[in-house]
Image: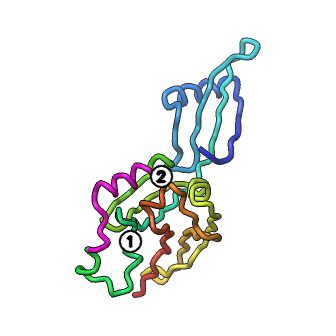
């Protein structure tokens, strides 16, 4: 797990309450923002509690275009994609399972799988490390139906994505979805 780590040492009556809470929940995820781990110990017969907060990175979503066993993908077509042409690029279930297994071994979570693509999640550091790129957050302003304005953050690759050698038989491309803008 990556992120900033801070250690805090508490002692006295306040730590007793915190110790009780953290003994009941030794690993607690606070709304996806950090994880707290605790350790109880004594210094000069004074009960102390050491808390370690690990700031978790935001979860990023990516779309992966799959390759069939013959190495082709839906991206290879030069003709319009229809139900007849798409069948040529359909990836079989065994190959999809192998792609999911390899991506999972890297630490990604596959959210959905189809005959042409996968949707997966992971943290920024994982995507950057595996695909040898740098991701940059971008915000877009979105107008809500009540004409108020909201902001939505997404990530884009600053450098070309490099697919690792062991994933090339399974993956044709990785993209990061841009939030849609709805008009009313």
For marks 1 and 2 on the same chain, the one whose residue lies earlier in the sequence: 1
> Which residue is at 44% across, 59% downward?
120
- Range of magenta residues: 88-102
| Residue 79 in the figure: left or right of residue 142 | left
144 in the magenta segment:
no
Which quarter of the picture shows residue 80?
bottom left
Secondary structure mostly taken by the magenta-highlighted segment of the chain: helix
Residue on which disc 1 sits: 73
Work out which quarter of the rendered image holds the N terminus and state it. Answer: top right
Residue 117: % across, % down:
37, 66
Residue 79: % across, % down:
34, 87
Residue toward you, 52 or 102: 102
Residue on which disc 2 sits: 108
Which structural element holds mark 2?
A: loop
Q: Is residue 165 above or below residue 152?
A: above
> Which residue is at 71% across, 30% downward?
9
Residue 66: % across, % down:
39, 65
Which quarter of the picture shows residue 82?
bottom left
Work out which quarter of the rendered image holds the C terminus and state it. Answer: bottom left
CA separation, marks 1 and 2? 21 Å
Q: Is residue 24 above or below residue 108?
A: above
Which quarter of the picture shows residue 180?
bottom left
Residue sitting farthest toward the top: 45
């Amino acid at each position: 797990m990556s992120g900033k780590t801070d250690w805090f040492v508490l002692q006295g009556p306040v730590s007793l309450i915190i110790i009780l809470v953290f003994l009941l929940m030794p690993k607690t995820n606070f709304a996806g923002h950090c994880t707290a781990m605790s350790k109880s110990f004594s210094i000069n017969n004074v009960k102390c509690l050491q808390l370690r907060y690990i700031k978790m990175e935001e979860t990023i979503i990516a779309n992966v275009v799959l390759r069939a066993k013959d190495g082709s993908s839906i991206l290879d077509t030069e003709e319009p994609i229809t139900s007849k042409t798409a069948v040529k690029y359909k990836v079989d279930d065994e190959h999809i399972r192998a792609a999911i297994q390899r991506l999972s071994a890297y630490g990604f979570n596959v959210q959905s799988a189809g005959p042409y693509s996968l949707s997966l999640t992971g943290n920024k550091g994982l995507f950057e490390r595996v695909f040898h790129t740098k991701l940059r957050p971008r915000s877009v302003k979105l107008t809500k139906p009540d004409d108020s304005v909201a902001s939505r953050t997404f990530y884009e690759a600053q450098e070309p994505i490099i697919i690792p050698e062991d994933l090339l038989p399974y993956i044709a491309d990785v993209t990061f979805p841009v939030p849609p803008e709805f008009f009313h």
